Amino acid sequence: MANIRSAGSWLAQHGLGDGPPTPLLATRLAARSRARLLSSVLVAVLFVAAALAQVSGLRAKSESGGPGPGGSTPVLVLGASIVGLLLARTLLDAWVRRVDRRAGAALARRVAHPVQPGWRDLLGRPYAALAGSTFAGALALGASALAVGEGTTRQAAVVLLVAVVGVGAGAVLQLRDLLARPVVAEDEVSLMADVIMRIEDARENNAPSVLGALPVVLVFGFAPGWWNAAALGVMVLGLAAHLAAHARTPCAAATARHLVDASTDVR
């Protein structure tokens, strides 16, 4: 009953209050709520793993009096941790798909011509540009710190680059999963809900918060002053760009309505 009430509130928030909160929607929303929570835990684990790699590298350097052969070990461990996190992300997405399939298998009828949105439909051009520019900015910060820094700064830059690549790979895998996930709907309202959930998942998972924070968390204070200012500038600009993208892009419900208008036949 709690999931049903939550589904009713979700429908009302997205302008679908005329539709009843069905068990199908309640099940799918509950699964996504748990997946978002676990995804946040994975992001926290990434930050902790990167910070530990940073501390381990600094300790190895201070004990050896230089970079030494053990300086690359924390980076390798971080790389292995990121591979494990990507695998966990993939398994989490697979679990959500299984929940959707089980819910869809119980439907008495299915949408005959379901809409299958592309990446431009899910993200919108402003959000897509924001995601690409944020990734490029974080990558450029890491590369510049690696190029001009020495010792501790270079170690921190390597850790940053590995973490940025991991976050980018995770975003690509998540978007790929959203595009490939089958539509589960029995009528126009549930089809609208399906598309809205995809759009919200895509936009949330491509927010610039993690990529904007990584350079400040991992390298800030070790790099030259101009680099520290640039890192703060990238983070602030990313936040401003995110607000601008949110203002310029139609909301998820409006985008879903536009996509669903031509696909409402039910068998």
Image: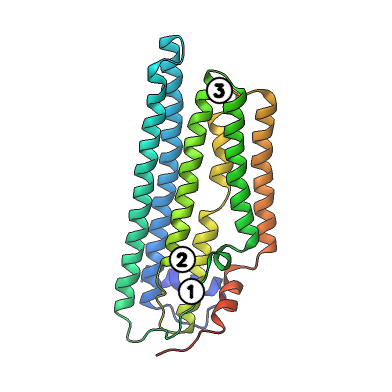
Rounded to the nearest angstrom, the CA distance separating label 1 from label 3 is 46 Å
Checking the image for residue 116, the label placed there is 1
Rounded to the nearest angstrom, the CA distance separating label 3 from label 2 is 39 Å
Q: Secondary structure at mark 3?
A: helix
Looking at the figure, which quarter contains the N terminus?
bottom left
Which amino acid is tagged 2?
A: Leu
Specify whether residue 220 is in view: no
Circle 2 residues within 10 Å: few <14, some 14–19, many ≥20: some
Image color mode? rainbow
Q: Are marks 3 and 2 in contact (CB under 8 Å)?
A: no
The x, y position of residue 107, in whole percent, is 33, 82
Q: Secondary structure at mark 2?
A: helix
Q: Residue at x 35, y 37 (%)?
A: 80
Checking the image for residue 179, the label placed there is 2
Q: Are marks 2 and 1 in contact (CB under 8 Å)?
A: yes
Which amino acid is tagged 3?
A: Thr
First of labels 2, 1 by sequence position: 1
Q: Secondary structure at mark 1?
A: loop
Q: Nearer the viewer, residue 138 or 203?
A: 138
Q: Which residue is mark 3?
A: 153
Q: Residue at x 64, y 55 (%)?
A: 129
Looking at the figure, which quarter contains the C terminus?
bottom left
Q: Nearer the viewer, residue 222 or 115?
A: 115
The x, y position of residue 82, in whole percent, is 40, 40
First of labels 1, 3 by sequence position: 1
Checking the image for residue 39, the label placed there is none
Which image quadrant for residue 99? bottom left
Which image quadrant for residue 154? top right
Q: Nearer the viewer, residue 241 or 33?
A: 241
Q: Are marks 1 and 3 in contact (CB under 8 Å)?
A: no
Specify whether residue 253 is in view: yes
Q: Residue at x 41, y 62 (%)?
A: 32
